[in-house]
Image (cartoon, rainbow, N blue to C red):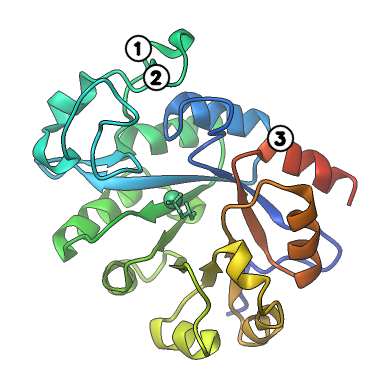
């Protein structure tokens, strides 16, 4: 089947809001998701990690220290303990009382208010933990609006096996010698390198497109680089400044 995530001729790269609109609101919260929605982001990127009792939460770091008033690894804290944390005050006092979203809450919010999710499975996950994420996506009836990505090859293999209906993307900090071979081995829908890495060999975009694989790059906040990446033909750009990228795209 043709890859529906390839950028149509004549349209700009998709705007992907990194951790929600994370320059304007506390990252990876429902507030950040709402700001990204209002900024006309095509996708909202978030990071998912399990609690001690196996509940998928939306959090970037392995610990809650930086983005909440708690301390310690998320894997040491239960869902009840995590929901009691303040995930907004660290960013600005006006966000006091913002909580860490569970994946269920994040998806329910998207389903009712609109939007698509680029869901990063963050860090190593067991097959069981990936199965839980898949179950939540299906229970929320959001399979058509979720794209799974990860740096973790095993997590992507589990996702492919457990949920062939979900699109998957491999995150890379540097380019593989042969990105097409990697994409074909894993059955990737997208190959998602760092934008800086991609610009060292922009011709790989054409190779990947030829193989039917989309390219979404991270995390790029400057208009100069948006232009270079747009010219390289990327399908989506992950940014902390979705409103600005959407505005820049509007002039496309
Ligand atoms: O979406 C890719 C990008 O988010 C990867 O880096 O550390 O922000 O998760 P990080
Ligand atoms: Ca991420």
State which quadrant residue 230 falls in: bottom right
- Check residue 88 in the rendering and tell me which mark sits there, or answer none: 2
Residue at 70% x, 77% y is 202
Specify few, some or many for label 3: CA neighbours under 10 Å numbering under 14, 14-19, or 20 or more: many
SS under mark 3 = helix
Towards the viewer: 107 or 171: 171
- Distance (Cα) linking label 1 and label 2: 6 Å
Left or right: 94, with 21 as reference point: left
Q: Which residue is drawn at 66% across and 75% down?
A: 200
Ligand 2 under 8 Å from disc 1 Cβ:
no
Q: Mark 1 points at which residue?
A: 97
Q: Tell whether label 2 touches label 1 (CB within 8 Å).
A: yes
Q: How would you rate the neighbour count of disc 2 (Cα within 10 Å): few for under 14, some for 14-19, many for 20 or more? A: many
Q: What element carries label 1?
A: loop
From the Cβ of disc 2, is ligand 1 less than 8 Å away? no
What residue appears at the point 57 percent right and 52 percent down from the top-left corner? Answer: 219
Q: Quick check: can you spot residue 40?
A: no
Query: How far across and how far down the image is residue 245, in percent?
Result: 74, 43
């Amino acid at each position: 089947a043709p890859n529906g995530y390839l950028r149509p001729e004549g349209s700009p790269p998709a705007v992907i809001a990194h951790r929600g609109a994370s320059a304007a609101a506390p990252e990876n919260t429902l507030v950040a998701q709402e700001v990204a929605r209002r900024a006309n982001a095509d996708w909202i990127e978030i990071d998912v990690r399990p609690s001690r009792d196996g509940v998928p939460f939306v959090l970037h770091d392995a610990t809650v220290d930086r983005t909440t008033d708690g301390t310690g690894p998320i894997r040491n804290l239960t869902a009840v303990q995590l929901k009691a944390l303040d995930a907004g005050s660290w960013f600005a006092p006006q966000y006091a009382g913002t909580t860490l979203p569970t994946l269920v809450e994040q998806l329910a919010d998207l389903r009712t208010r609109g939007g698509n999710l680029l869901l990063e499975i963050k860090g190593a996950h067991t097959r069981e933990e990936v199965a839980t994420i898949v179950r939540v996506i299906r229970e929320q009836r959001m399979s058509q609006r979720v794209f799974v990505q990860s740096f973790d090859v095993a997590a992507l293999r589990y996702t492919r096996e457990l949920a062939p209906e979900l699109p998957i993307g491999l995150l890379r900090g540097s380019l593989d010698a042969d990105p097409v071979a990697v994409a074909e081995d894993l059955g990737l829908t997208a190959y998602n390198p760092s934008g800086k890495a991609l610009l060292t060999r922009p011709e790989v975009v054409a190779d990947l497109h030829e193989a039917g694989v989309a390219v979404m790059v991270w995390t790029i906040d400057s208009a100069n680089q948006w232009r270079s990446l747009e010219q390289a033909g990327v399908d989506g750009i992950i940014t902390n400044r979705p409103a600005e990228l959407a505005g820049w795209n509007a002039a496309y």
